[in-house]
Image (tube, grey):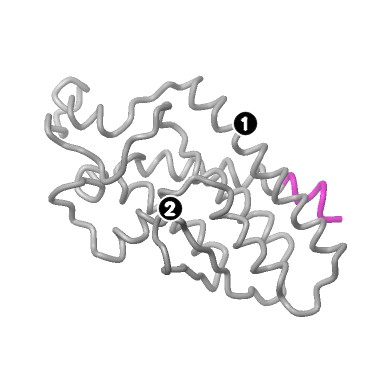
Amino acid sequence: KEVKAMGAKVGSQRSEEQTQIARFWEATMPAVYWPIARSVAGAPGRDVARNARLFAAAGVAMDDAIIAVFDAKYTYNFWRPVTAIRNGDLDGNDATERDPAWAPLIDTPMHPEYPCAHCIISGSLGAVLDADIGTGPTPTLTSTSPLVPNAPRSWSRVADFVTEVQNARAYDGVHYRNSAQVGGAMGKQIGELSAKSLLK
C-alpha cells in the first residue's frame, strides 16, 4: 500500500521533494555513488594511501554487493510492485485491491524485485565510509545525478544518504519497503567485511 500510494506515476501522495529524490536515484550508474566517497577523500588532512584504501574498500564492497544482490534476486524471483498492484485481487491478501491501471513513477527494471540493488550498494558504501570516518567528523557528502541536472544532493550523516536511497525506491514505485531494508542490511554486512579487510 505504501508503494501504491507513494510510487504512483499519477495521483501519488509524494511531495515535490520526494519526487526529486526518486528522480535523482533513478540513476543506476556508479557515477552517482563515487562522488559521495570523494566527499570523504577530499576532507582536510587525508593522505594518498588512506584514500587509496578507501577507494579500494568502496569498490570491492559495491562490486560484491552487486554480485550478492543479483544472486538473491534470481533465487527469490519476487514480483515487482507494478505486477502485484495490478493483480491485488489474486495475492491471497484481503487488504489489497486490484488496480489494473496503476503505473510506477519510473520504468520498472527488468529483473526481480527482492532485494533492492540500490539499497545494497548504498548500504555497502555507507558501511565503508562509516568505518573510514570512525569517530572523526563527517564531511558534507554530496553527489549529482545525470537525471536531475543542476540539483546536487547533500547529507551531513552517512545514515541520511543510505536512508534516502531506501526511501527513493518506494517513491519511484519499483521496490517495497522490506526489500529496501533487507538490501540495506545486506550491504552493511558486505561493506563492513570489505572495510575490515582493506582499511588497515
Residue that carries the numbered disc 1 in the rendered image: 67
Q: Are marks 2 and 1 in contact (CB under 8 Å)?
A: no
Q: In the image, what residue occupies the spot 53% across and 46% down?
A: 29
Residue pointed to by mark 2: 25
Q: Quadrant of the N terminus?
A: top left
Main SS class of the magenta portion in the image: helix
Q: What kind of element bears circle 2?
A: loop
- Across and down, in percent, residue 199 comes to 81, 55
The front one of 66 and 152 is: 152
- Mark 2 or 1: in front is 2
Number of the label disc, if any, that sits on residue 177: none
- Classify mark 1: helix, strand or loop: helix
Location of residue 145 with respect to 98 vertically, above or below:
below
Q: Please indicate whether residue 20 sits to the left or right of residue 133 in the image.
A: left
Residue 164 rendering spot, x and y as whole percentages: 43, 58
Q: Decide if residue 3 is on the left or right side of residue 169.
A: left
Q: Which residues are magenta?
A: 193-200
Q: Quadrant of residue 18?
A: bottom left
Residue 117 image offset from top left, x and y in percent: 50, 39
- Residue at 16%, 37% (x, y): give it: 102
Residue 111 percent location from the top left of the image: 43, 27
Front residue (pair 10, 187): 10
Q: Is residue 38 above or below residue 94?
A: below
As shown in the figure, which amino acid type bears the numbered disc 1?
Ile
Residue 53 belongs to the span the image colors magenta: no
